[in-house]
Image (tube, rainbow, N blue to C red):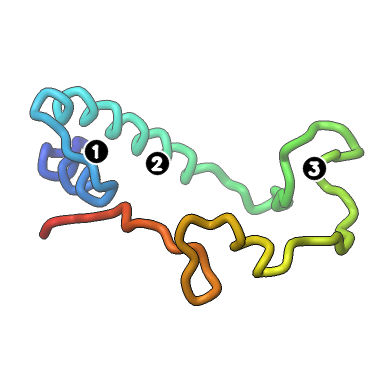
Amino acid sequence: MALTEKDVLYVADLAHLELTDEEVKKFGPQLDAVLEYVQKLNQLDTAGVEPMAQVTHGTAVNPALREDHARPCFTQEEALQNAPEPGDGCFKVPQVIDREE
C-alpha cells in the first residue's frame, strides 16, 4: 500500500500538523511502513486469545490495581481559591486551539 503525498498531507491535517515538502517525503514511507505492519497484525488469528484488560505488570500482584477508597478532597471553593480566573465554578483557561479554515 503506497501512500501518496496527498494521503500524508491528509493525515497531517487531521493531526493539525503543518509539514514541509521535505517532511512529507521523509514521513510518507515511515507512515506507509507502519500501516503495512498493522495490515500484517490484522491477518493474525486471534479467535482463541483471551482479551487482556491490564498489561502494565508481569507478576500476579499488580501494584497499578489498588483498592478504590473514598478519600478527602477539596471543595469546589477550595480548588478555585487560587485560580487566576475562575468563572461559573470552573477554571477559565485561554483558548489553545486557534485554527484557520
The picture quadrant where one finds residue 73 is bottom right
Query: In the rendered view of the protein, which quadrant contains the C terminus?
Result: bottom left
Residue appearing at x 90%, y 38% in the figure:
60
The residue that mark 1 highlights is 1
Residue 39, numbered label? 2
Residue name at image x 8 percent, y 28 percent: 21
Q: Secondary structure at mark 2?
A: helix
Residue 5 place in picture, x, y as percent: 11, 37
Front label number (1 vs 3): 3
Residue 25's mark? none
Tags 2 and 3 touching, CB below 8 Å? no
Which of the two marks, 2 or 3, is nearer to us in this view?
Answer: 3
- For mark 3, what is the residue? 64
Q: Alpha-carbon distance for marks 1 and 2?
A: 10 Å
Question: With respect to residue 13, does 22 lie above or below?
Answer: above
The amino acid at mark 2 is: Gln
Q: What residue is shown at x 41% (from left), y 33% (from top)?
A: 37
Q: Amino acid at mark 3?
A: Ala
Disc 1, disc 3: CB below 8 Å? no
